[in-house]
Amino acid sequence: MNATTLPLPVATAALGTADDRVRLFSRLGWTAIGIAVVLIAVVVPLMALVAPDGSALHLSSYALTLVGKILCYAICAVALDLVWGYCGILSLGHGLFFALGGYAIGMYLMRAIGHDGVYKSDLPDFMVFLDWKAYPWYWAFTDHFWYCALLVVLVPGVLAFVFGYFAFRSRIKGVYLSIITQALTYAAMLLFFRNDTGFGGNNGFTDFKRILGFDIYAQGTRVALFVLSGLTLVGVLILCRYLVTSKLGRVVTAIRDAESRVMFCGYDPKAFKLFVWTLSAVICGIAGALYVPQVGIINPSEMAPQNSIEMVIWVATGGRGTLFGPVIGAFVVNLAKSVFTMIAPEYWLFFLGAIFVGVTLFLPQGIVGLFRRRRGGGAA
Amino acid sequence: MSRPPQPPEAPLDWAPGLPRDSGVAGATSGGLDARGGVIEGARVAPEGIDTSHTVILYLEGVTVSFDGFKALNDLSLALDDGELRCVIGPNGAGKTTMMDVITGKTRPDSGKVFLGQTIDLTKHDEPSIATMGIGRKFQKPTVFEKHTVWENLELALKNDKRWWQSINSKLKSWQQDRIASVLSTIGLAGETRRLAGLLSHGQKQRLEIGMLLAQDPRVLLLDEPVAGMTDEETAELAGLLATLRGKHTIMVVEHDMDFIADISEKVTVLHEGHVLAEGTLDEVKANETVVEVYLGR
Amino acid sequence: MAMPAGIAKPGAPAGPLMWRSAFSACSWREWLVVVVALALLLALVAPAFAVTADDLKPLASDDFADKATAVDTLMSAPDERVAAILAAMGSDQLFFTDETHFYIGDGTTYVDAITGAKAEPKADALKPVEINNRVRGKIDSAQSALALLSPDRGVRSKAIETLAGSPDPALAKLVDAAVAKETDPALKARLELVQAAFALKSDNPATRLAAIKALGRSENPQTRLLLLPFVQKNADGSFVEPDADTRAAAQTSLDAIDRSQKKGELLGALFSGVSLGSILLLVALGLAITYGLMGVINMAHGEFLMIGAYATYVVQGIFRSHFPGAENWYLVAAIPAAFLASAIIGAVLERTVIRFLYGRPLETLLATFGISLLLIQASRTIFGAQNVEVANPSWMSGGIEVLPNLILPWNRIYIIAFSAIVVALVWAILNLTRLGLFVRAVTQNRAMAGCVGVRTPRIDMLAFAIGAGIAGLGGVALSQISNVGPDMGQSYIIDSFMVVVLGGVGQLAGTIVGALGLGIVSKFLEPFSGAVLAKIIVLVFIILFIQRRPQGMFALKGRSAEA
């Protein structure tokens, strides 16, 4: 062994290890986050609420909802990136967790309609339509906002935990896991399509009136939901950044690259995977809960396998294994989608299909990777 | 094989050139030593590895079959604590499968596998067997290619490896020192910030061995450690193994006879899933059946 | 028939394993035919009754019970206006301004509900006639009764089936008229059973007894529900039916129904299971080849199915316009055409996209999903978003009657035979030809095969093309039993993935057992749980199964499985 000649303390300092890692973001990163927070929490509300209707600075409720919606998608993308980009688990079923979060808050919103439905009944319209006389048991307490907010976290979390426990225990991975997650969301979609399931069948929940007593279509409410979504995204980004820069993050990426070596190092990969997987599902559920009041509808088509795969392409487009990448990807793909649906809806699928093929073939590192390469290699 | 038993709490001295500072290591190892079973108590039998009968690893009548093909056939083998054992055998003799069984990767169809007197390895999975003190080096060097050399060692370092502990985990200075000394042992001190994937084959082999050292296992399983190494590197590894001898129990599977001649005390020959012969290299070489198996009839 | 989206009939015995709107069965056009036919028939045989404003009055109320009664009143004197009003009610197109003025309209043009004359009501005064599920049930059976008079045998047959399950006394008269007119002996026998079901509610015990005995011959499971009340007890322990003879007769009839049902059900489930399994097999076979050989999970595989089905459609069109005499045999020409179409597109995709992604299964999965989107949209652009019509050749329609309540349709029998032949061919190609030898060599050890001179890229392309071509063959088969549309591939792809997962990768035997097993199990579950729940149960079962055997049923163990 060519024993090193460096005296030890110098070696340690030169390594610059642990101290490097403590820093969450660079100064530039913190500045960007600060700007984002100001934009979300100050500038947008001013533009939407204070700027007069006709002025160039005014933010229409259409634009507000569109961006708010994409912010929710971006949260999902970050969550998906956490499992795919960092842990190598490609989930084709994250739409399920998103939709479950949406359904959980949707139950509250349905109860909040009160007697203002078409049938003026105690029950939601779809239950009247089915001739149901009372709420099924699992609708108990859903008239309390906080209970539903708890469900937003618990339902996707518990489902992901149980599924993940069995899947990771039996070491299902790679494409097998992807296919099984796809089957899971597909099965759930079929279940929610049934009228008997008690979640409004294929119409789902819609025609919401108010949330926590506020008119759900009022500009103020929309702005509040927008700010909440934006700040949640920032929070999720910081949380994920904290995790991936921690030792946990390094173990998780190690699992992605060489799972057996991780096991023989003494780490239990299933515990790490399960943690990241469940966390990701919970974040997706929260995104869904923020999404539903903004768009005013949740139905089983949110669980369609295609929706989940689209989430994956946001991540791939932006750049997986980076945290800002998925946010960029979610914005790019979804803005393109709204442009296409306005101009040439029939070409949207062509475009989306081309993104799938093009990104996997030519942009394996996504948009972020493109910039990194331009900057000259860049650090890992 | 007369060797004073190793006191379990003795700090390790596998880093030549690093002054043995038992004060530092001793002070910290109280909370972290797996053998004491303080932290990994949830996984390891609290009494640790019982080597009271000098045997540390013990296989008896182990059979593993894959779709009718018996990879291991009634294999029995015992390693004494601190022994360095070489295992040789033609391709398909079951060497890798044997390591799979010991490390929990493959469950035997029948037979006993014990670590010390008390721990039944067939009842544990890979991570817990690893925390109990069995480290393994793969045939093909397996390191975390997207991590730096330093991070590879950090991940391997003996530590609390449960997931919630890792969220806020930070290396203490004595742990950093340990990593640094492993780095110098394996000659990669100048490469700490390089991605492991960018290392040469020989460097990866050394890094993987370094990870085992950082893991500080009682039993080291090395699957063809010198494959792809230069002669110089091979000689260095032989030197390293010589320093580890007695402190760790080592099992080396190897094809390189010169290397084995360099390091071996006792050699076991595997053939068709069970032990064909056992003894010193010269004894084994003189054994007619062994010659027959290697050279064919 | 435009159905409000809120109603999805649970557990509809629709098609194989996939979920479809159960109400696509009767189209708006079919109803139009019925209405016109009714108009003609009733004009000849019945004295002209007219719907009066009084009849409709209850429809304007808020009380759903009143509305149900109003439907009965209307049906006591059915004519084409009644048919039109009911159809409009069923599709939410009946409106009123006040209790005497009712209009049928689609939002732009309106006719007076009573006279059928064009009308121009004030749009803002219009209120819709709302219905709930009970009223809708009423309307459905009324429409079935009206459909009894349709000239189309199929429509009549379907109507009889619906009516037999829920005989509504208000419709008895109409059924009597239909029995008198029915010429088809099979339908007439079934109609008489419906009549018997009505007679059950008669006040005359002799009539009831005769009806009960007659119903013992019924093959309709819902008849059971009609007979059950005769053997049940009241809350106080006394029998609902006081006459012991009648009770005994009812019990005998019930047993007879149960026996014939059970036998038919069992065989029927087995047959439809095998039939579904054979379709899944055709889809999964190609998937198993591409995955086994190249490790490529092809998400666009379902679209090769679609390409095959559209190729069949095109060939049918060519035969119709160029060889009208041979139209019955277009299917024979469609088989090679579909295989080639899918195989060529498959080969092109392999060369242009997939080969760059070998060894990156997750990326391949995404890229092939993109390809599937492109192919779906392309077929929409070329053939339109609507389903196209592919007709069964005459030799495939009809079926063999195995049991009175079990008819095995020819098209399904042919499909089972067809997939058996395809499996045999694939086996032969893999095991008896040089190409098969190369394919197996590449599957086992790509690098080594390359070293001994196998041109692996060529083998990859051929194998991928064959896999795609087999899916195309599946498309031909599918075109004979289900709708051909741009999305058709999506319905089967998840199931066929399950087959591959279940059977183990790259294992022909595993794929066969997996496909047939999946088909049969889901068909056996369906009667107990409904199609949707059956599907969910199967998916959960597969997830649990993978717990036990992560590599599938027929997987290799040991070293080779790790590679």
Image: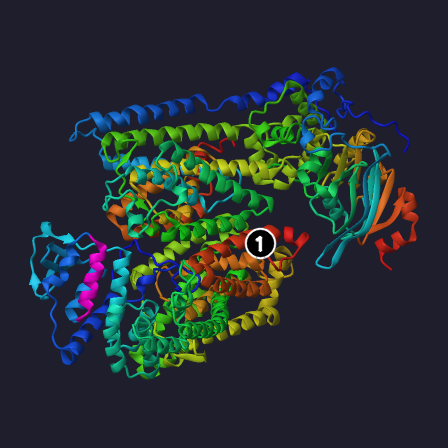
Quadrant housing residue B157: top right
Residue range in magenta is C63-78
Say whether residue C71 is magenta: yes
Image coordinates for residue B252, horizontal then vertical, percent: 79, 40
Q: Quadrant of the N terminus of chain A?
A: top right
Q: Say above or below: A16 vs C296.
A: above
Say whether residue C527 is magenta: no
| Colour convention of the picture | rainbow
Which residue type does callout 1 highlight? Phe
Image coordinates for residue C425, horizontal then vertical, percent: 54, 72
Count numbered badges in the picture.
1
* Relative horizontal placement of residue C136, taking residue A241 as reference (left or right): left
Residue B227 visible in the current orientation: no
> The residue marked by circle 1 belongs to what chain?
C
Q: Say above or below: B258 vs A45.
A: below
* Relative horizontal placement of residue A323, taking residue B81 as reference (left or right): left
Q: Which residue carries the number 1 mark? A: C545
Circle 1 sits in a helix, a strand or a loop, which is it? Answer: helix
